[in-house]
Amino acid sequence: MAERNLDFDKVIDRRNTRCVKYDFAKAKGMPEDVLPLWVADMDFKTSSYVEDALAERVKEGIFGYSDVQTPYFHIVRDWMQRRHDWKVEEDWLIKTPGVVFALAMAVRAYTQPGDGVLIQPPVYYPFAAVIKDNGRKVVNNTLFIGEDNRYHIDFADFERKIQEEKIKLFLLCNPHNPVGRIWNEEELTKLGDICLRHGVIVVSDEIHHDFVFRGTHTVFAGLKKEYAENSITCTSPSKTFNLAGLVISNIFIPNRELRHRFYGEMNAAGSSEVGVMGIIACEAAYQHGEEWYRAMLAYVKENIDFTRRFVEENLPGVRMTDLEGTYLVWLDFRDTGLGTEELENLIIHKAKLWLDAGQMFGESGSGFQRVNVACPRSVLAEALNRIKKAMHDR
């Protein structure tokens, strides 16, 4: 059986499919006719092996409570070892309905109300949300842009904030969403050693770990045994294979005590089994989706390069931050002279685009826009040309 879903140029009409990306513009305060390149799912059909596996399961016609058996772990284990050179054990694995849910459980499990939790903005906005919504305090170690057009960590500030705010938990984003950094071994080791020195537990969100365009993704827990014992690692097939709606994530917690505390919060939240379709999709993707994954990755890489060229040649005053990983381009509009509100008006009402405004990722994201380029190139070109025209006409 051959992979069928390799035409990434094909434009698929996702409207009227209960699609958050396309069908809820008006409900979320946007004009109904915007072109959406915001939320991080792809406009590509997933692997045909996943399609077929789900269709076969539907034929059974019974969708009762379900759980995984050992073959599921073996399939996940093999993907992690093959793709990331990381050996995991079966008792480390906890399945959750998404990574954001896991972040919330970790905040509840490892901190108390009022405690500070450290994040590195501009960062994926649910990081701050799960901290605030659970009555904890957001503490920022703000990233900065270097002369190399990449974001970097202020390690002195990182350690100072841990000491001053009595931090117990750090939420790491690697690869980093939205700035596109893949933290290298030296950077991760500095972070890990500081956290060990001060007794800070690390939650490493590695959901974008399969999108690497320069360098190598390093699993934080794989660097040192001490890091593995002091961290939880959040993964999912959802970004890699466009399965977000099936709400399946694989969380790895080597430390028995940390695992017990995490389970305790899941039980308190009333969470037990995940959906059977997520289980089926994960198995099919990791076991049979390699050809689709490689082809998709190459196509997305071409989209990133296309965007970089377009910005350089057609959008004066706009700069694309150097991107090492994820399919989320981070555009810097600060040199265009547009204020935050002016920029939003230009993007939404002039260009008729729905992107992610940078300020939602933290104050340091003001003046930026996040663009999801995991779409057919014709759609991407249309979006970029809309920005070009809107800027020319202003």
Image (cartoon, helix red, strand yellow):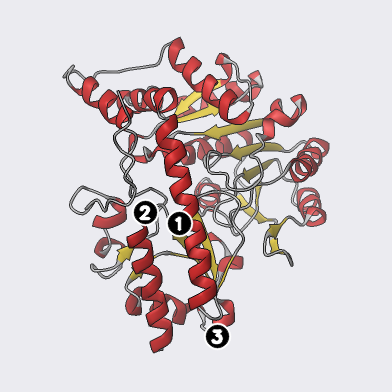
Q: Is residue 150 above or below residue 264?
A: below
Q: Where is residue 198 in the image (x, y as percent from the top left)?
A: 80, 39
Q: In which quarter of the image is residue 256?
A: top right
Q: Is mark 1 on a helix, strand or loop?
A: helix
Which-is-in-front pick, marks 3 and 1?
1
Is residue 340 among the parts visible in the rendering? yes
Is residue 347 among the parts visible in the rendering? no
Which-is-in-front pick, marks 3 and 2?
2
280 to the left or right of 330: left
Q: Mark 3 points at which residue?
A: 337
Q: What residue type is labelled 1?
A: Asn
Disc 1 to disc 2, how far (Cα)?
Answer: 8 Å
Q: Mark 1 points at which residue?
A: 303
Which-is-in-front pick, marks 1 and 2?
1
Q: In this view, does 70 lie above or below 20?
A: above
Q: Position of residue 168 (x, y in %)?
A: 70, 40
Q: Which amino acid does label 3 sit on?
A: Gly
Q: Mark 2 points at which residue?
A: 375
Q: Foreground residue, 104 or 309?
A: 309
Q: Is residue 179 above or below residue 205?
A: below
Q: Foreground residue, 343 or 196?
A: 343
39 to the left or right of 103: left
Of pointers 1 and 2, the one earlier in the residue sequence: 1
Q: Residue 257 carries which label?
A: none
Q: Foreground residue, 257 or 61?
A: 61
Of pointers 3 and 1, the one earlier in the residue sequence: 1
